[in-house]
Image (tube, helix red, strand yellow):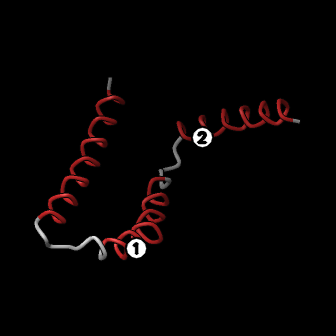
Amino acid sequence: MQISLLLMEEIAKLFAIMLMGYVVVKAGLMKSSESKSISVVMVYLVIPCVIIDAFQVDYTADVKKKDCSWHVQQQFWYMFYF
């Protein structure tokens, strides 16, 4: 249940961002030709920073346990594909 609430919250944030962009263009504060430069900044600067930030986690015992299970899964996929 908690995961679905987190997912719903993130989806709501994305829709809010889309709504703000729609309102800005319809209000005439930004032209569609100006959106290309903002898109380039988002793709090449902001999104990589967000991805790197998402992988920043504290190394705890729980993370170590999951890391161990990841190695088991990796070995399984190696055997499956080769």
What is the x, y in percent for residue 79?
85, 31
75 left or right, relative to 57: right
Above or below residue 57? Residue 44 is: below
Depth check: 73 or 80 in front?
80
Whether residue 79 sits left or right of residue 19 in the image: it is right
The residue under the point 19% across, 52% down is: 19
Against 17, is 76 above or below? above
Give the residue type at disc 1.
Val
Label 1 vs 2, first from the N-terminus: 1
Residue 51, compared with residue 42, is above or below; it is above
In the figure, residue 9 lies in which quadrant? top left
Q: Quadrant of the C terminus?
A: top right
Residue 1 placement, left or right of 31: right
- The mark tally for this picture is 2
Residue 42 screen position, x and y as percent: 39, 68
The circle drawn on residue 64 is 2
Do the residues bearing badges 1 and 2 touch, measured as CB atoms within 8 Å?
Answer: no
Residue receiving disc 1: 41
Q: Where is residue 63 shown, x and y percent of the image?
A: 55, 40
Q: Which mark is residue 76?
A: none
Could you tell me which secondary element the residue under label 2 belongs to? helix
- Please name the amino acid that badge 2 sits on: Lys
- Percent coordinates x, y for residue 76 in the rendering: 78, 30
Residue at screen point 20% across, 73% down:
30
Circle 1 SS class: helix
Please give the name of the residue rendered at 48% of the width and 55% of the height, measured from the top-left corner: 56
User: Which quarter of the rendered picture does the N terminus lie within?
Assistant: top left
Residue that lies at the very extreme toward the left in this rendered image: 27
